[in-house]
Image (cartoon, rainbow, N blue to C red):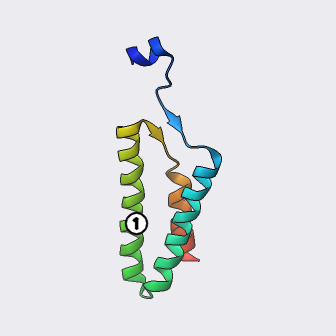
Amino acid sequence: MLSAGLDGLPLLWAWNVWGEVIWIWSWAITGSLLAAYFRQPTYLGLAVGAALLSVYGICLIVLILYSCWIAFIPAALTLGSSAII
């Protein structure tokens, strides 16, 4: 924090708009592919749950290691909704 204050560096940073658009769309496509592959609702639910844990884990690891804020909620919503639809 001291280095950020003295050097003028931001504590957190985020991707640009196109980076977040690609991030969200990639999880929407992942949800659609999971729904196409897993036909039974039980397996689909487990796969979507594992994918949601992956999204959360990736967001958390990138936040801790690189101080980069990645949109978790929009990615999780598009993953789940594309799997359901």
- Which quadrant holds the N terminus? top left
Above or below 3: residue 52: below
Check disc 1 and give the amino acid type.
Ala
Horizontally, residue 10 falls left or right of residue 18, namely left
User: Where residue 6 sits: x, y (%)?
Assistant: 45, 11
Furthest residue in direction bottom, as rendered: 39
Q: Quadrant of the C terminus?
A: bottom right
**Label 1 SS:** helix
Residue 83 visible here: no
What residue appears at the point 59 percent right and 63 percent down from the top-left corner?
A: 25
User: Which residue is depicted at the point 37% across and 60% down?
Assistant: 54
**How many numbered discs?**
1
x, y percent for residue 8:
51, 17
Residue neighbourhood size for the residue with mark 1, other residues' Cα within 10 Å, grouped as few (<14), some (14–19), many (≥20): some
Is 46 rendered above or below residue 75? below
Residue carrying label 1? 51
Position of 11 relative to 6 (above/below): below
Residue closer to the observer: 5 or 41: 5
Q: Is residue 15 above or below residue 50?
A: above
Residue 16, by quadrant, is top right
The answer to which image quadrant residue 64 occupies is top left
**Residue at x 39% of width, y 52% of height:** 58
Position in image of residue 68 (x %, y %): 46, 39
Q: Residue at x 62, y 55 (%)?
A: 21
